[in-house]
Amino acid sequence: MDSTPTPSDAVPSASSAHDDAPTPAPHAPRHRRLRVALVFPPNKRGKGEIDVFAASTRAGNTMDLVVLDLNAPTPLADQILSILGPATPLVDVLVHKLTSTYLELRTIPRPWTQVEALVAAHPNLVWMDPLQAALGPILSRRALTAELRLVCSVPDTHVMILADNPPTVWPVLVKRDEAMSTAAAHVMAVVLNAAGWRGLIESGPFAKDEVVVVQQVVPHDGVLFKCYVLGDHCHAVLRPSLDVEGVHDDFLVFDSQTIPKSFSLPVDASNPVHAAFLHGGEPARERAAAKLESIRPDLEVLARRIGEQLSLTLFGFDVIVDQHSGTRYVIDVNYFPSYQGVDDFADRFTALLYAAADRGREKGI
């Protein structure tokens, strides 16, 4: 495996500077109503806390929201005017969830240029996490790994053509380079040995000449720490994760979108993916829960480092802890997660929008 040096454990102790208790949600200054434009593809609407936020915002009459349609013939500015009416500024903040349609936007000029034209025409408008600058690295696992190595520890990773020489250290996780732009990006495989590698080449979901990202599997007790970030706030929860002790074949293919998300699910012995992800069960969850409070300040440090390195405000990341050395590894970053389970999401998101609008006004002074 190709191993680029990374900072030792990557997260210095932060217990002296942070309280383990979650920080209270900020109260956003309500000196004026905000006008916020949401750009979400149709398949992402109706999912996650952003929709709960939109509903509560409308019910509480705290700000004006408009959902923009990039495929409509009506220009974006006219869509805003028709729904919100004229005002100065036309809109304060633009929030998007366009990772799944990023590649399409790059190849179909009109939707892309519409967004750029709207931002250019309104210099005070704050585009939360601009698409090209912020999201480019996280849509390629190869690029993301290179960025993460600068600020944290990642498992040993290298890029290769599937049919080339197999790895020499097992087990490994095999993924496509594209991280989230297609459904196929979520299909991956864990390979336990050379026989499994040969089986993956012959009957797996990857083409023999496909370029894949191969990552060393770190033993982590079958639990990951899923972190949701809003600006400078990091909320961490526990999720089941792959435990190779529960893999009974030479290789196992799974879809990361459909793996078990809760430890309380009954283990289906006939389902090898369930067996692999729920192998540790409640004892593993309890061990991780005891560990969570002690490492929460370090997760906040990681959130700040990743956000600064990738220029992201709204993102999630997954951390595993080596069950032998205690080293913390970041294994994934995604843009604008669901935030489900973040009870104070609406308050924190509102405060974030007001702070962004303040920056926009200062920029226009």
Image: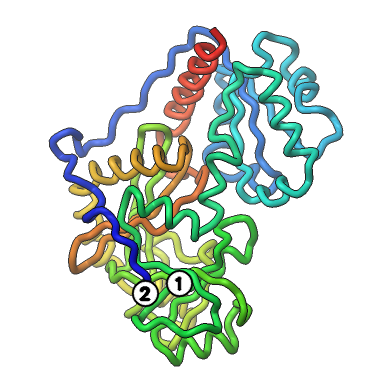
Q: Quadrant of the C terminus?
A: top right
Q: Quadrant of the N terminus?
A: bottom left
Q: Amino acid at mark 1?
A: Val
Residue named by callout 1: 214
Which one is in front in this view, the residue at disc 1 or the one at disc 2? 2
Would residue 312 appear left or right of 131 to someone viewing this image?
A: left
Q: Amino acid at mark 2?
A: Met
Q: Position of residue 356 (x, y in %)?
A: 50, 22
Task: Indicate which disc, 1 or 2, sits on the residue closer to the N terminus.
Answer: 2
**Residues marked 1 and 2 touching at CB (< 8 Å):** yes
Residue 185 sits above or below residue 276 on the image: above
Secondary structure of residue under mark 2: loop
Residue 149 sits above or below residue 218 on the image: above
Residue named by callout 2: 1
Residue 91 sits above or below residue 262 on the image: above
Local packing at callout 1 (Cα closer than 10 Å; few below 14, some 14-19, many 20+) is many
For the point 23% across and 55% down, which residue is it?
A: 9
